[in-house]
Amino acid sequence: MNIHNLKEEIKENDGLINLILEDVGFTDISNEFNQGNEFRCAWEEGGNPTSVRVSKSTLSANCFSRGIKGDIITLVQEKLNISFSQALNRISKIINYEDVNVEVSLPFGGFFNEILSVVDDDNGDIQTYDESILNEYLILPSERFLNDGICCDIQERYKVGYDVCTGRIIVPWRNLSGELVGIMGRLNKDKIEEYENKWFPIISFTKSKTLFGFSENYNAIQHTSFAMIGESEKFPMALSSKGIDLGLGLGGSSLSQFQANNIKSLFPKRILVCMDEGLDEDISRDIAKQLKIDTFFENEVGYIYDAENKYLPKGSKMSPSDLPLEEMRKLIVECSKKV
């Protein structure tokens, strides 16, 4: 599902916001407290009629009495105690939303640069698969990934496994709603021959139509209003292994319009682009510029570039997330640039 399009459908529409809040059980939704840019209501019958806040322009949301901070999607999750994908489906049904996967006009238009070497698939929605397809593989943590700093708990969360037929470590990819859309496979050996691909899709999919870690880290990004953008699927997993559930993986060194729209639909106040060593600074800068919002809502966007290879050795192709936590913090402090 295109979360950006769903939120665009709801934003600034008092009737739809009211419908969602009422349907999931919020109370005291009245015009008395819904003036200007905010909706206010009570969590439950008899509660404080101003304790729940929803912004009409961004759909950011808080429940002050329960310490909840996020958006209208996380608010529905918490209210009904359901998963992220279940909350999306519930909201879609309430407002009778159909995800036709058509790119809409860019918000805050006019500042996107040319998309870098990406051709989006315009032939319809990205195909999804039943979870049972993972039964064909051995779902267990990889020692190679463990040595790379990705702990067993995080590998289990992302259902990392092994494909006996191809001899590859498998990493399932999901769409923004959390549904399985493809599987990438990494050769489980150190020396890669010239004729071999280190990474190869076992189940092919269009990476530019999703973001690795989006559904898993959505709530944490909403709560902190901070997102970190990296290249590979290992980037969010390595960050989470350090206790930082803020990573999103592009699946390469390019940012598609679809990815940019959905990152910005989170309305994070801060975004940090963390590309691998060896990539030209111009590419990181351009990606950061594509994520800049400078209208009624302003965000701070920056990128990491270790020009002197103080932390990321030259030729290493290392990701900032590969560093130990303290070194990564120093890299961010010393080598971040704003756009």
Image (cartoon, helix red, strand yellow):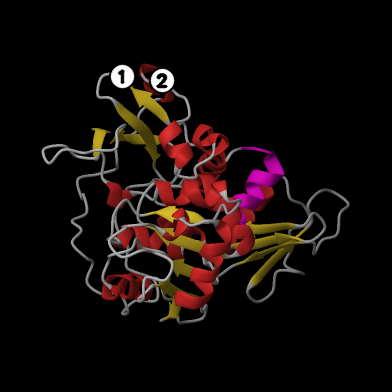
Q: Tag 1, which secondary structure? A: loop
Q: Is residue 249 visible?
A: yes
Q: Position of residue 258 (x, y in %)?
A: 32, 58
Res. 24 in view: no
In the picture as drawn, the residue positioned furthest to the left comes out as 195
Task: Write down the quadrant of residue 314 in the picture.
Answer: bottom left
* Residue 140 rendering spot, x and y as whole percentages: 47, 25
* In this rendering, position of residue 56 left or right of residue 66: left
Seen in the picture, residue 21 relative to 85 is either above or below; the reply is: below
Q: In the visual, does 299 lie left or right of 39? A: left
Question: Circle 2 sits in a helix, a strand or a loop, which is it?
Answer: loop
Q: Is residue 53 left or right of residue 190?
A: right
235, 69: nearer the viewer: 235
Vertical placement of residue 209 versus 336, above or below: above
Q: Which residue is mark 1?
A: 164
Pinpoint residue 168: horizontal percent, then vertical percent.
Answer: 30, 29
Return the residue at label 2.
Answer: 138
Q: Residue at x 46, y 31 (%)?
A: 159
Give the farthest residue toward the right. 46
Dots 1, 2 in contact, CB < 8 A: yes
- Type of amino acid under label 2: Leu
**Quadrant in which the C terminus is drawn:** bottom left
Please determine whether, in this image, residue 267 is positioned above or below residue 246. below
Which amino acid is tagged 1?
A: Val
Query: Residue 131: which numbered mark, if any?
Result: none
Magenta stretch, residue numbers:
71-82
Q: Name the spot of residue 235 as percent of width and height, x first.
A: 43, 52
Within the magenta stretch, is there residue 81?
yes
